[in-house]
Amino acid sequence: MSTRQIDSELGFIHRFIPAKRDDANTLLALHGTGGDEDDLLSLARMIDGEAAILSPRGKVLENGMPRFFRRLAEGVFDVEDLRFRTAELADFVSAASKKYGFDSRSVVGLGYSNGANIGASLLLLRPATLERAILFRTMLPLKPEKKPDLSGKKVFISAGRSDSMIPREGAIALQKMLEDAGAQVTMNWEDSTHSLVSVEVRKAKEWLHN
């Protein structure tokens, strides 16, 4: 059974699908620009068929398309808005864990593009929100004022060598930032564009379950 709702406590239109067993992960599914709370459900199920899924819809609109934070241009982020939206999303996850009864210490970020970038921002600004993260087509979204302690965190980053939207150096900068903060990062490169390919989904699943 799943729910899609917005309420005064949680504040995001979202879908929640309960886990199939008590000790399962909770996947925080974060869509790309123009997506919604349904976009990554099938991807989440492919990666972890037993996990709970918490999938919010981004609250910022760009030409009518939902996003998780504003940008000033392609690849140029509104950092002030990003900080605000990151805190807002972290608070949503915390409130949702109380409402739905999942363990807030076992949340795995699953993000694509804009969603992956705010997932990276959660790691840098509100690291307690995520235990692990799978970030497809991501880059360093901002430089935190204070380096977080990411000891014990594990992150899977998957990038496309022919991605015209995410510069190679942006993905590498994120990898370096996370590793410098103590995270264990698995960096995966595919001969692909901004679109996902099946092999990286399989690799992400294997990484999560190892």
Image: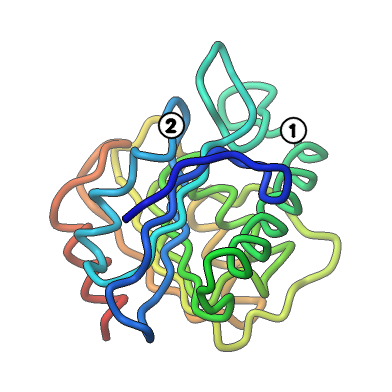
Q: Position of residue 174 (x, y in %)?
A: 56, 59
Q: Looking at this view, name the residue that lies furthest to the top.
A: 63
Left or right: residue 76 compared with residue 169: right
Query: Height in image: 61 above or below 179?
Result: above
Query: Height in image: 94 above or below 166?
Result: below
In which quadrant will I find the C terminus?
bottom left
In which quadrant will I find the N terminus?
bottom left
Name the mark on residue 21.
none
Q: Looking at this view, name the residue that lies furthest to the right.
A: 145
Name the mark on residue 165.
2
Report which residue position mark 1 lands on.
78
User: Observer-nearest residue: 7 or 65?
Assistant: 7
Q: Residue at x 23, y 52 (%)?
A: 190
Q: Position of residue 139 (x, y in %)?
A: 53, 49
Q: Secondary structure at mark 2?
A: loop
Q: Amino acid at mark 1?
A: Asp
Query: Height in image: 181 above or below 11?
Result: below
Q: Amino acid at mark 2?
A: Met
Instruction: Please rate how many residues cluster around mark 1, counting C-alpha atoms within 10 Å: few if below 14, some from 14 to 19, many from 20.
Output: some
Instruction: Please rate how many residues cluster around mark 2, counting C-alpha atoms within 10 Å: few if below 14, some from 14 to 19, many from 20.
Output: some
Q: Residue at x 74, y 55 (%)?
A: 143
Q: CA distance from mark 1 to mark 2?
A: 17 Å
Q: Residue at x 66, y 51 (%)?
A: 89
Left or right: residue 98 compared with residue 81: left
- Counting residues from the start of the chain, the first of labels 1 and 2 encountered is 1
Q: Residue at x 64, y 28 (%)?
A: 60
Left or right: residue 195 compared with residue 83: left
